[in-house]
Amino acid sequence: MKRILALILILTMALALTGCGAAATTAGAAETQAAATTAAAAESKTVNIGVLVWKFSDAYGSTVRLAIEKYAKEVGDAQGVTVNLDMQDANDNQTTQNDQCDTLLAKGIDLLIINLATDGAAQALIDKAAAKGVPVLFYNKEPTDSKTLVPAAKSLFIGTKPEEAGVMQGEIFAEQWAANAAWDKNGDGVCQYLMFKGQADNIEAIARTKYSIDTAVAKGVKMELASSDIYVCDWDTAKAQDTMTAAWASVGSKVEAIFTNNDGMAIGVIAALNQVSFNSGDKAKNYIPVYGVDATDEAAAAISAGKMAGTVKQDGDAMGKAVVTIAVNGALDKGWLDGTSYEMAADGYSVRIPYAKIQ
């Protein structure tokens, strides 16, 4: 009997120990699962960024917009987050852009990227975002009405040095003018030129217009505006083509060079020149040098075909990468430039992407 009781006791203890082990295993599995769930939650953090674009159809702007989309995953992976972009096309209408801003802020975004439809409309958008505690990053079109573009105030601008494109245009032209005596059609030693300006009050347009001519003069070229005024064509290809067609009727015979603030307008000018059998590809016959800015694919093709004299590369891919990289830092409430190779410009509120000459 005692022997039977001993066996029963041994079996009971064995079962108890097995149960404890199972409980411990279950508890350990639960802890592991909880840790995995926490890690997965951290890895799946989504950063929601609203992007207001002035006009999807703009050629240069499209290169920046597509680069923002292209680099979003790469930047997100580096930061351990998923970057969700909500892009809106204002189609060159500031009222539309203001409404789009309200809609994005109502969604609870973490940061707002803005490519202004109107340069002087920044402050209202900054105020809207500030009321929601949302950082704002402007790009390409530098605000002309805001005094609060300071990193500490959760606002920043990414663009270029306004004068640099004009300086490079002037340098390309002066070098080419010196090498092509036949471009001086009337032999007076003065270049009679036309100027196509992007927008009347745009910082970039003003600088490109001024410094292209100032640089040419500094390089020894005598310059004279062939028309009664500078043509403002809103960065638009069709407007530039129509304007050039009209200008040809009055001043075409004396024009010796044409400067445009962007490649879109340059392409429009060339289309108008083609209609009167100029700039068809033979530089030795019926040719007027045309200069642009942006180095779009269409402009590069025109230069290769002998229809365009040169452009200045505004690196849309590099700008798009900088925009999304710095934006994610801002959305995560980090320093704007933390962990990047970008540098703050001397003005204290911007990052500037360099230009390059293309001819």
Image (cartoon, rainbow, N blue to C red):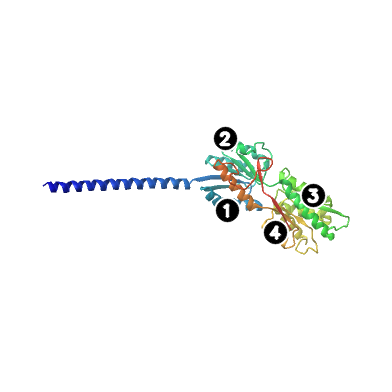
Q: Relative to 359, does residue 30 appear above or below in the rendering? A: above
Which badge, 3 or 4, is on the more N-terminal residue?
3
The answer for how far apart the CA atoms under marks 1 and 3 are is: 36 Å
Q: Relative to 309, does residue 228 appear above or below in the rendering? A: above
Identity of the residue furthest to the right in this view: 188
Does 108 sit left or right of 292 as displayed?
left
Please provide percent x and percent y for residue 135.
58, 40
Q: Are marks 4 and 1 in contact (CB under 8 Å)?
A: no
At label 3, the amino acid type is Thr
Helix, strand or loop at mark 2: helix
Please provide percent x and percent y for residue 83.
53, 48
Q: Which residue is mark 3?
A: 215
Please provide percent x and percent y for residue 173.
79, 55
Q: Which residue is mark 4?
A: 300
Question: Residue placed at 38% from the left, 47% from the top?
Answer: 32
The tally of labels here is: 4
